[in-house]
Image: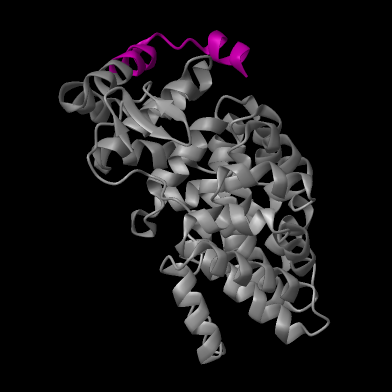
Amino acid sequence: METKNGFTYLGRNFSDLNLNDNSSSAFSDCNSDRSGEFSCASSESRRKLWLSCAGAADDFSDDLIRQLVSGLESSSIDDQKQAAMEIRLLAKNKPENRLKIALAGAIKPLISLVNSADLQLQEYGVTAILNLSLCDENKDHITTSGAIKPLVRALKTGTSTARENAACALLRISQVDEHKALIGRSGAIPALVDLLENGGFRGKKDASTALYSLCSIKENKMRAVESGIMKPLIELMADFGSHMVDKSAYVLSLLVALPEARAGLVEEGGIPVLVEIVEVGSHRQKEIAAAILLQLCEDSVVYRTMVAREGAIPPLVALSQSGTSRAKRKAETLIELLRQPRSGNAAARDI
């Protein structure tokens, strides 16, 4: 979403970037069900669900929820699947059901399903947890009930839908700041980096969004860099057809505060990619790329030399003349740095 002061996402205000592009924000919220589920539901079951989702009497809805929670603990895998599918639909389509379902005791049995060796049952459990996590009041309950490690396991080994929805669920849980470190310490970061690199388009989007949230704290930044995130970020930024340039750049902008991330960016060939974005990217892409290059160059003569040799000054001059007021200031500051004398001795000391 755009504000007067800049770009805001997950409570973080990008006023320092002042992205005034009126297109949709770089990150879209993780959604839940995308498949054609419920094909196996009986006509009576579908009728009850339709009545509940359409706003039937509360006592009817509460009675149905109690029945479904009981079904989650059935000895029959088919009954568990049916109950999990119906719960995920109730939680998806009617926000007030999310808290009701949690209060009815669904979270712990759903976590048991996430631990299931049956991949379809695991997927249904993951997606139901995701839908419940859309309710702020449920986030702590989901975490304290022990959902993080099973979600990370599903993120590593589940179906493609389970992996994507596990990433989204972890994103939702991470919106409580105290949960970010817990998620990072549970092994989520390497699995998200793998999804970013090897997942489908939706998987890449969901992974980048979760990583953006989690990497707002230093220890998760380090985990991401150590997990090899720089390579897929740079590759996605270099591919304008990936529709991942903005998302990857925002994640990168969080990481470059670390010396290790700056070194990884250079090693993976990030400088020419960033210079190209400043030259031919959208207004927002140009601004974030200039901001990253400025962070890279502020304390390093060596990196300034590399950026200047890559031909950054002409597109930066153009940005300083046609960008937003904040983009102009960043471009002008970076041009000043790049035009400073670069003696051999200074460069040697910088190394």
Q: Quadrant of the C terminus?
A: top right
Hey, which residue is sitting farthest right in the picture? Answer: 75
Q: Residue 342 in magenta?
A: yes
Report the front residue among 104 and 88.
104
Residue 307, x across and y down, in percent: 41, 28
Q: Nearer the viewer, residue 250 or 35?
A: 35
Residue at position x 32%, y 27% from top?
6
For this view, does 269 lie left or right of residue 323? right
Using the image, determine if residue 65 lies above or below residue 239: below
Residue shown at the point (51%, 37%) measured from the top left? 252
Determine whether, in the image, residue 25 is placed left or right of residue 292.
left
Left or right of residue 1, residue 33 in this image: right
**Could one spot residue 94 in this view of the protein?**
yes
Q: Residue 282 falls in which quadrant of the image?
A: top left
**285 displayed left or right of 300:** left
- How far across and down, in percent of the image, does residue 39 sit? 52, 88
Q: Position of residue 287 (x, y in %)?
A: 32, 30
Image coordinates for residue 126, horizontal then vertical, percent? 66, 64
Q: Quadrant of the N terminus?
A: top left
Between 157 and 225, the residue placed more toward the observer is 157
Q: Is residue 324 magenta?
A: no
Residue sitting at 39 percent across and 37 percent down?
274
| In the image, residue 71 above or below residue 225 | below
> What residue span does the magenta drawing correspond to?
332-351
Give the image's coloring scheme: one colour
